[in-house]
Image (tube, rainbow, N blue to C red):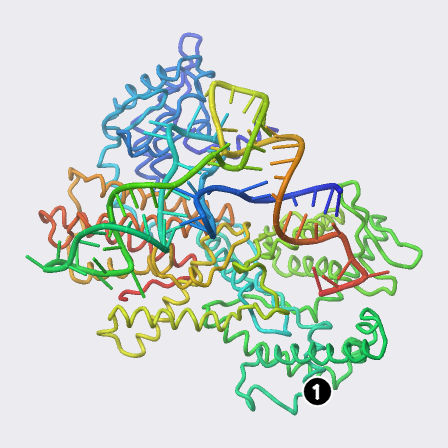
RNA sequence: GGUCUCGUAGCUCAGCUGGAUAGAGCAACAGCCUUCUAAGCUGUAGGCCCUGCGUUCGAGUCGCAGCGGGAUCACCA
């Protein structure tokens, strides 16, 4: 079992060994020539992987022991020590039955026999610090680029659906939705750029008691208002009537309480609530008049939503509507009953017993045969799978639904549905205000459209204050403000690990300094400016250039990008890319201070640095692109 | 109460499968624009990584217990 697993993970580099029977013993001979050749062919073998592979060969040669690559631990050398990468030898000490220092020393001596790669080493307390030849970086700089990377990334044959946003149609999108939407969008881009086929899906909750409340308030109080007649964006208009419903309802309840009912009874008996429920019944029976209003008001909401999505630069490949899926799970439940996986209680309700998995019993159909939330989610999961047959189905849903999603997957597994195993809940923490959770009743909900407006106007204000508006047409300026405002907003929400809850601090979110989107965008714009001024320049570099520490550091960072991208895909975590963007931008800004580019010491240095600029530029724009953030050429 | 989750600088967060003296950004203080965009850069200060025990050559990271926040345990969605 374990062996099989190792086999799957075993890197292809294994093939580089020749195993020879030599005087009764098996010797594993690393072939360095073919190894180096292999490295050249393999365009995107990371430097750390190259080093690990070299160490693997060295261990085989010195100790005659095969070591798996994942057993070799490589870190970047801490700045206070000399070297580029550090190998930790403690873990191998037992296996090789040698002291850590001895292993480090022996490996260091062996590896530096390949001067094409390693220029030196030192050993400190079991840590082997290795210095790499500059040519390794220069070769990387000459050959690699994002374009190469894009070309190298091949479809991995895995299809994944990402469901996100999934709004209710009774109110506009608010700040809490933004984290969901940006996460889902960024994840989709990341998966796409790591070789997956991606379907971006949105499951719209367009039916139910909530929309009936809006409809009812509009009928009673709307006076025929439409988005056109009022000039109010459709989703906001419908949201206003949802609020109106609650006001009217509250009035009725208060009246009933005054008439002597208890608050509980009053809430149940308020005629408005009964009317809403009656409306829901009529909707379910297909009453034409109800459906007409429902269609009309949902249409307004969609117009509003699409305007908002459009401003965010977000599109979906597939829309699902609960009005079309809410009955789906029933057949699944019937089948489960017949197979004896579910059971029916005396009152006719259907349940599944999950106590063997440490959970409770879960209701799947009410006594009267109607569905619950879980039922339709079961059906929708199957529908999605029937539609696309994806390997993985990601649900971007808040962590308040952890239990629900756990149960959903478990039930589908018990029903032996093929869609079950691919279900992955990308659970994210709630966005809170410094004062606590956003509460619609307390009016602390921050509206998504307002938030975008706010960020764009701050971008405008900052740009004008800094006097950076010259040379732009007014159209270019409004594009720029949009780019910066949304960049700031997206970055702010994506920079925190999704699974952690985050505090939305309005003061901090409007700051365009430091660990922010505009900081990265600014760095990008500066690089563009330098490259514009440089004009045409030589594209080939000498092999024997001496790199400065800062140049090397930048190249190291650039070289890591594909791995960063893979990591964020593997972890479903765009924050990894935010951190990388900031680090790269910061490092570049530092570099710029003591490395003149256009007035470099000589042509060679200038060419080298321009090339580095290009590499940083393309990495930054690609990385920002994964977050759904545009990079401005000027700002 | 059961289950899950989080606890790192004044605040917001990084810290990869355990690896060297725990890092950023805000905020504070001190500096840097005759030189490629100062939305920038440099420096100072700020820490019993919630507590305790355990595993280990080595623990912010893993295990157990406790303390403190949050989520969830609906014939709501």
Of residues B9 and A574, which is closer to you in this image?
Answer: B9
Q: Position of residue A399 (x, y in %)?
A: 62, 53
Q: Position of residue A140 (x, y in %)?
A: 27, 42
Q: Residue at 82% across / 60% down in the picture? A: A365
Q: Residues within 10 Å of mark 1 (few under 14, many from 20)?
A: some
Seen at 52% across and 87% down, the residue is A231
Q: Nearer the viewer, residue A184 or A494?
A: A494
Q: Which residue is mark 1?
A: A219
Q: Secondary structure at mark 1?
A: helix
Chain letter for mark 1, please: A
Viewer-proximal residue among A376 and A214? A214
Q: Is residue B29 above or below residue A117?
A: below
Residue reaching furthest right? A346
Give left or right: position of A569 versus A487. Answer: right
Residue A536 appears in the picture as rendered: no
Residue beneath the point at 59% across and 71% down = A443
Residue A74 percent location from the top left of the image: 38, 31
Query: What residue is rendered at 43% in x and 62% in y?
Result: A507
Q: Nearer the viewer, residue A401 or A323?
A: A401
Residue A477 is situated, as x and y percent measured from the top left of the image, at 31, 74
């Amino acid at each position: 079992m374990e062996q099989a697993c190792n086999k799957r993970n075993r890197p292809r580099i294994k093939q580089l060994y020749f195993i020879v029977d030599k005087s009764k013993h098996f010797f594993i001979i690393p072939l360095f020539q073919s190894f180096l050749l292999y490295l050249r062919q393999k365009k995107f073998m990371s430097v750390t992987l190259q080093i690990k592979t070299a160490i693997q060969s060295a261990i085989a040669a010195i100790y005659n022991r095969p070591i798996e690559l994942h057993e070799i631990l490589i870190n970047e050398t801490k700045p206070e020590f000399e070297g580029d990468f550090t190998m930790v030898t403690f873990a191998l000490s037992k296996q090789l039955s040698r002291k850590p220092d001895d292993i480090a020393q022996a490996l260091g001596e062996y590896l530096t026999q390949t001067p094409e790669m390693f220029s030196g080493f030192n050993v400190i307390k079991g840590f082997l610090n290795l210095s790499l030849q500059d040519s390794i970086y220069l070769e990387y700089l000459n050959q690699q680029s994002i374009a190469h990377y894009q070309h190298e990334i091949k479809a991995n044959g895995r299809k994944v659906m990402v469901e996100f946003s999934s709004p209710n149609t009774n109110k506009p999108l608010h700040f809490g939705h933004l984290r969901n939407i940006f996460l889902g969008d960024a994840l989709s881009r990341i998966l796409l750029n790591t070789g997956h086929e991606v379907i971006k899906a949105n499951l719209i909750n367009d039916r139910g008691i909530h929309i009936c409340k809006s409809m009812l308030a509009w009928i009673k109080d709307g006076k025929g208002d439409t988005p056109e007649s009022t000039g109010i964006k459709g989703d906001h208009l419908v949201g206003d009537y949802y609020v109106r419903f609650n006001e009217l309802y509250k009035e009725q309840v208060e009246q009933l309480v005054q008439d002597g009912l208890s608050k509980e009874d009053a809430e149940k008996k308020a005629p408005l609530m009964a009317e809403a429920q009656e409306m829901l019944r009529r909707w379910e029976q297909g009453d034409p008049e109800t459906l007409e209003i429902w269609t009309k008001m949902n249409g307004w909401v969609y117009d509003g939503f699409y305007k908002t999505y459009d401003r965010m630069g977000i599109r979906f490949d597939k829309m699902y509507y609960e009005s079309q899926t809410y009955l789906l799970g029933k057949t699944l439940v019937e089948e489960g009953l017949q197979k004896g996986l579910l059971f029916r209680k005396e009152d006719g309700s259907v349940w599944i017993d999950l106590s063997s998995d440490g959970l409770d019993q879960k209701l799947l159909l009410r006594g009267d045969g109607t569905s619950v939330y879980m039922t339709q989610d079961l059906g929708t999961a199957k529908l999605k799978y029937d539609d696309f047959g994806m390997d993985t189905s990601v649900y971007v849903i808040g962590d308040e639904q952890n239990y629900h999603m756990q149960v959903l997957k478990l039930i589908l597994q018990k029903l032996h549905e093929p869609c079950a195993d691919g279900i992955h809940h990308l659970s994210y923490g709630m966005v809170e205000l410094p004062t606590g959770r956003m509460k619609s009743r307390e009016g602390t909900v921050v509206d998504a459209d307002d938030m975008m407006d706010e960020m764009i106007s701050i971008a405008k204000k900052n740009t004008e204050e800094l006097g950076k508006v010259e040379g732009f047409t007014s159209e270019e300026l409004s594009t720029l403000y949009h780019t910066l405002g949304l960049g700031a907003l997206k970055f702010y929400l994506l920079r925190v690990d999704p699974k952690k809850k985050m505090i939305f601090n309005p003061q901090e979110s409007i700051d365009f300094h430091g660990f922010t989107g505009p900081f990265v965008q600014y760095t990008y714009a500066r690089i563009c400016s330098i490259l514009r001024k440089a004009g045409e320049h030589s594209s080939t570099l000498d092999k024997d250039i001496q790199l400065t520490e800062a140049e090397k550091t930048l190249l190291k960072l650039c070289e890591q990008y594909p791995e960063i991208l893979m990591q964020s895909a593997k972890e479903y975590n765009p924050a990894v890319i935010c951190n990388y963007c900031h680090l790269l931008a910061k490092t570049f800004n530092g570099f710029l201070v003591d490395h003149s580019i256009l007035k470099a010491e000589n042509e060679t240095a200038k060419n080298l640095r321009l090339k580095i600029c290009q590499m940083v530029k393309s990495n930054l724009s690609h990385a920002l692109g994964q977050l759904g953030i545009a990079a401005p050429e000027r700002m």
